[in-house]
């Protein structure tokens, strides 16, 4: 099976459509959305509608921290992420909010664990930025000996870690479009990047494809109309910073 792994869409409809089109061209057979469907972007309702429809085709959908914020926005915003939670919540109808609220934090199938942040207490939204965080996530996930792969988002970066013959982890930065062998005898953790909020200085969207039959993982970068997404943020009256972030990829 060819599984498309998409995370951190953040209400960016233009980026989501571009990645889905690209993924279908890669002949993916199933979609998995690893959380943060909303937050920051101008089109949370349309993004949620798209993804809700894909569940009828068997898509897996997880809850991220921004999705949780949209269901229960704080009375007083203390972070950048919290600053648009109330606005995002008001764009969603009751059915959409109820659907998001019941989304799981993790999903398992075969030897794969999907999670938004770290598998180590996923409800705490811990970041997997380095070998230490990746090791904690892998250790928690692989408490189930059947798990060999952990895929998540949250950090808005594309990276891959594996555990070799020793207990230490190796990290490398993948090249877009290059299939990476990920044999099952090792333990692997990948962060698939952000569809709607890339932050590595490049505006192109990010996602990955996992080929379960060939045991290969391919990270992708997808150009999209980020100017249109930025203009939609401005038109919605959201902070200018969020529009500029899309244009700069930071």
Image (cartoon, rainbow, N blue to C red):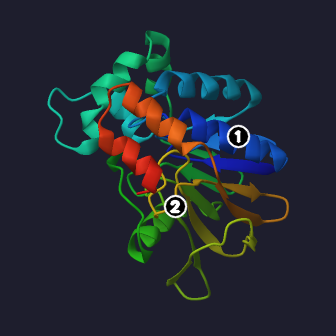
Near-viewer residue (10 or 249): 249
Residue on which disc 2 sits: 202
**Tag 2 secondary structure:** loop
Q: Quadrant of the C terminus?
A: bottom left
Q: Residue at x 48, y 67 (%)?
A: 139
Is there a contact, CB below 8 Å, between mark 2 and mark 1?
no
Near-viewer residue (246 or 38): 246
Residue on which disc 1 sits: 20
Measured in 3D between alpha carbons, the distance from the residue under mark 2 to the one under mark 1, in whole angstroms, is 19 Å
- Binning the other alpha carbons within 10 Å of mark 1 as few (below 14), some (14 to 19) or many (20 upward) gives some
Q: Tell me, yes or no, if residue 43 can be seen here.
A: yes
Question: Which one is earlier in the sequence, the residue at label 2 or at label 1?
Answer: 1
Report whether 33 appears left or right of 181: left
Task: Specify the farthest residue to the bottom.
Answer: 166
Q: Is residue 186 above or below residue 100?
A: below
Report whether 37 appears left or right of 235: right
């Amino acid at each position: 099976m060819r599984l498309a792994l998409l995370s951190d869409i953040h209400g960016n409809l233009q980026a989501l459509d571009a990645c889905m089109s690209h993924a279908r061209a890669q002949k993916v057979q199933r979609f998995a959305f690893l959380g943060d469907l909303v937050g920051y972007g101008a089109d949370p309702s349309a993004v949620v509608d798209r993804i809700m429809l894909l569940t009828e085709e068997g898509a897996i959908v997880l809850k991220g921290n921004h999705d949780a914020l949209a269901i229960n926005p704080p009375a007083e915003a203390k972070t950048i992420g919290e600053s648009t939670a109330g606005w995002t919540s008001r764009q969603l109808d009751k059915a959409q909010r109820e659907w998001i609220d019941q989304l799981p934090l993790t999903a398992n199938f075969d030897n794969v664990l999907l999670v938004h942040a770290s598998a180590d207490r996923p409800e705490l939204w811990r970041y997997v930025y380095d070998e230490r965080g990746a090791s904690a996530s892998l250790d928690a996930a692989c408490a189930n000996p059947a798990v060999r792969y952990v895929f998540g988002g949250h950090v808005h970066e594309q990276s891959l870690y594996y555990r070799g013959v020793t207990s230490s982890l190796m990290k490398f930065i993948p090249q877009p479009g290059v299939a990476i062998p990920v044999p099952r005898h090792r333990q692997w953790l990948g962060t698939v990047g952000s569809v709607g909020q890339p932050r590595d200085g490049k505006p192109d969207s990010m996602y990955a494809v996992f080929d379960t039959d060939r045991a290969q993982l391919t990270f992708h970068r997808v150009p999209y109309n980020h100017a249109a997404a930025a203009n939609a943020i401005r038109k919605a009256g959201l902070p200018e910073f969020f529009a500029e972030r899309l244009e700069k990829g930071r």
